[in-house]
Image: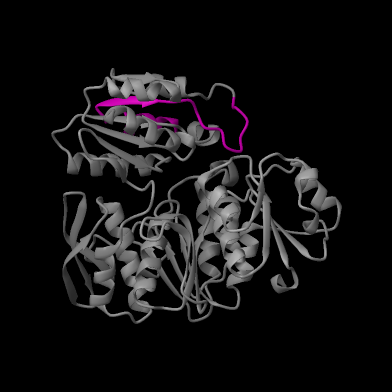
Amino acid sequence: MINNYKNIYFLGIGGIGMSSLAFYFINEKKYVAGYDKVNSNITKLLSNKGAKVHYKDDVINIPSEFLNHLETLIVYTPAISKSNKEFKFFKENGFRILKRSELLGLISQNKFCIAVAGTHGKTTTSSILSHILYENNISFTSFIGGISENYDSNLLQNGNDIVLVEADEFDRSFHTLFPNIACVTSVDPDHLDIYNSKEKLDSAFTQFVDNIKSKGVLFSNEKTFLGGISYGFSSKCEYFISNYSNSKSSSFFNINYNGISVDSVKFNMPGKHNALNALAAFAIGKELNIDDKSIINSLSTFLGVKRRFSYALRSPKIIIDDYAHHPSEIKAVYETVKDLYPNKTNTAIFQPHLYSRTRDFIDEFAEILSKFDNIILTEIYPAREKPITNISSEKLLELIDNKNKSLLNKSDLSNSLKESDSEVFIIMGAGDIADEVEIIKNNILF
């Protein structure tokens, strides 16, 4: 069906998931164009690759060659409002319109599909596995929900026998996938604006697992309820980690499976949560018949994912940039920071993401943020949402049980941190807080 179209038009082309598809279709020699409200590094790179990108929602900006509904396929992200002028135009004029997840389903349906799901960890796990496959010359294409440090890209291609995708639970997107190998890294409550309850989220993950093809394989974190081949820190798991330690921003551990111990594994991302992501990738690599030594070598050369415990600065201060936007993710970051820097004072800078998530987990956010030495909040990043009455960063700040707390405008962060006595700054959030990292870094250096 996709081959019938010579043009692919993306609504929300600059999104991390959408852009990987746009790059893919550029490589497939399709004509690519799209709209995004933000002019970003990704959209600039797409433009440099030949995509026609504009930033004002107006039908007049759609290139004329994309106005033929028989030749143009429309792809949109759920973050795009149904009131978007271009979306309405395409709908009213008989264009074929697909969600991003539906397109991924079509791309992968006749391929050997590996799908990595989970409320946390799927991007890092997918990136590690992509690196393993690439270094071992496996024929594959992977669509990653982050920018791999090794390849500076969210699309990695070395053939097309295998399609590796992130299975996104938001909006039940992962139900379009029917994988041969599935991995579930975590099932913590999230996206309750979509699911309303943990039970409904759990049910959605159960359906995803039910979609695994006949004779397919499931790998799941020991803390999930989904069965399959388990992995974790418990020796009861089929794959488990022992002798874990952190040192100089790397993890060291042994991997155990089938009575075999693979010792002294070095992985260049700190934190037990990242070691588990590496373990999941190792287990899937074994399922693909890659030998231990080759996988371990790949783990040792994996450089990480941008905004996943990424070091923006190491001296004279330490700046860590992380995508963490859920209490469980912040907890993992906190534990890693305390493990690596137990005697250094720290400051957490957190931009809450979504009014609904702040409302649903406000007590949990307050509890974990209170543990940092100092806490700075910025205003909530709304993304696709309208404000919710009585939900604000001010309310979250009130609940944080720590006298060293404040609420700042993003524009004031840089000067505030320059004057701070803290030795470690941890900048967290899934919104536009990442745009401040370089400014903060330069202000501290100069």
- The image shows residue 200, relative to residue 37, as above or below, that is below
| Left or right of 261 in this view: 271 | right
Quadrant of the rendering where the C terminus is positioned: top left
Q: Where is residue 157 in the image (x, y as percent from the top left)?
A: 48, 70
Q: What stretch is highlighted in magenta?
A: 361-388
- Say if residue 432 shows up in the picture: yes
| Left or right of 419 in this view: 207 | right
Residue at 40% from the left image edge and 67% from the top image edge: 130
Taking depth in this image into account, of 444 and 308 the one nearest to the observer is 444
User: Is 386 one of the magenta-colored residues?
Assistant: yes
Q: Position of residue 295 (x, y in %)?
A: 28, 72
The quadrant holding residue 439 is top left
Colouring style: one colour
The quadrant holding residue 433 is top left
User: Is 103 one of the magenta-colored residues?
Assistant: no
- The image shows residue 197, relative to residue 439, as above or below, that is below
| Left or right of 68 in this view: 253 | left
Residue at 41% from the left image edge and 30% from the top image edge: 363
Taking depth in this image into account, of 14 and 393 the one nearest to the observer is 14
Q: Where is residue 149 in the image (x, y as percent from the top left)?
A: 36, 55
Q: Position of residue 284 (x, y in %)?
A: 37, 72
Total numbered circles = 0
- The image shows residue 362, relative to residue 267, as above or below, that is above
